[in-house]
Image (cartoon, rainbow, N blue to C red):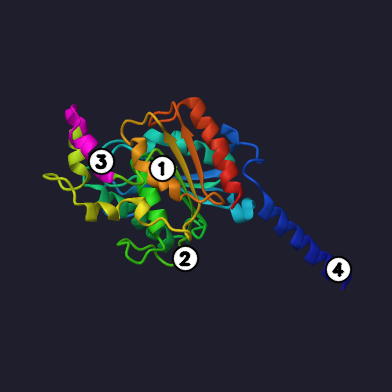
Amino acid sequence: MKITTLYLLLIFSFVLSSCSKKLTSTVDLSATEKETVYKILKDVSYDSDAEQVMDIYLSQNAKSYGKRNYTIVFLHGGGYYFSDKSQEERYIEPYLSKGLNVVNLNYRLKRGIPLATSDLTNALNFLKANNTHYGLNLDNVIVTGFSAGAHIATNVGLAQNNPEYPNKLDEGIVIVGIINFSSPVDGLDLIERIFIEHENDLFSQVGKALFAPDDYESKENLAIYEPITYFDPSDPPIFLWQGALDDQVPPVTFEQFDLKMRKDKDLRIFIPDGKQSPSKGQFENAYIEIFKFLDKF
């Protein structure tokens, strides 16, 4: 009887310790330690298009976080037109330093916001269907991104509980948090005009490729891809980093969204001298706040 009781106490102590492990108190892995801790799968196809690939970083340490064993899914920026997962790896490095499982995702470019947005759902559903190979905690997903990628992440993260949203996540996939660097959350009509009417021809091409190539998109269709459309009290917590000097996603486009943010769940970092891409110091400070944010879940 005493042995059984002691055994149960040890199990309870282990579980409690596991659940209480915090990201903020975990020492970052060295480069050498990362090589030992991670198995890296490069350019895993999640559908038939050449751009529908992802890098998967599987950590031996992830389960030690217990309830904070997040699966981080990151999407790069680039106006739905440029860039690649390899070009913005600085955004996943802090998570790798903590020993979390990370997915770095490419999506279809130059074919509009709707198609690109569907690729996050496609990738998550692929991971669920094939999770015997990966062992990811897909009921504990954090979606995150920069600029266009953060727009996708936020839209999907907030819309997952809305029956009217067109792209459905498979059962067993739960997005528990959203981390957004410099993306649209509202006012897509203004952002579309900023790009289409830009004096730089390349920017104008980006704008024309966001939706319909020959005209401005209707407000009804724009609303499907505006995160504010889906934001409600039951949505997962959201971390929002915004620069006041962002000339691509101007502050006026997130004013209404900011008013809806919940003081007990969400966190907004507003940088008066911030541009679209955070500086080195702004970036480092942001991740200090991100890990505090994730420790509250």
Residues at marks 4 and 2, CA–CA distance in whole angstroms: 37 Å
Name which of mark 4 and mark 1 comes first in the sequence.
Answer: 4
- Which amino acid, by three-letter code, is at mark 4? Ile
Judge depth for marks 4 and 2 and give the one in front: 2
201 is within the stretch colored magenta: yes
| Pointer 1 residue | 145
- Which amino acid, by three-letter code, is at mark 1? Gly
Callout 2 touching callout 1 (CB < 8 Å): no
| Pointer 4 residue | 3
| Pointer 3 residue | 190
Q: Is residue 159 left or right of residue 11?
A: left
Q: Is residue 116 left or right of residue 85?
A: left
Q: Position of residue 52 (x, y in %)?
A: 31, 49
Badge 4: few (under 14), some or many (20 or more) residues near its Cα, within 10 Å? few
Q: Which residues are magenta?
A: 188-203
- Which amino acid, by three-letter code, is at mark 3? Leu
Name which of mark 2 and mark 3 comes first in the sequence.
Answer: 2
The disc label shown at residue 90, or none:
none
Q: How many marks?
A: 4
Which secondary structure type mostly characterizes the magenta part of the structure?
helix
Dot 3 falls on a residue whose secondary structure is helix
- Which amino acid, by three-letter code, is at mark 2? Gly
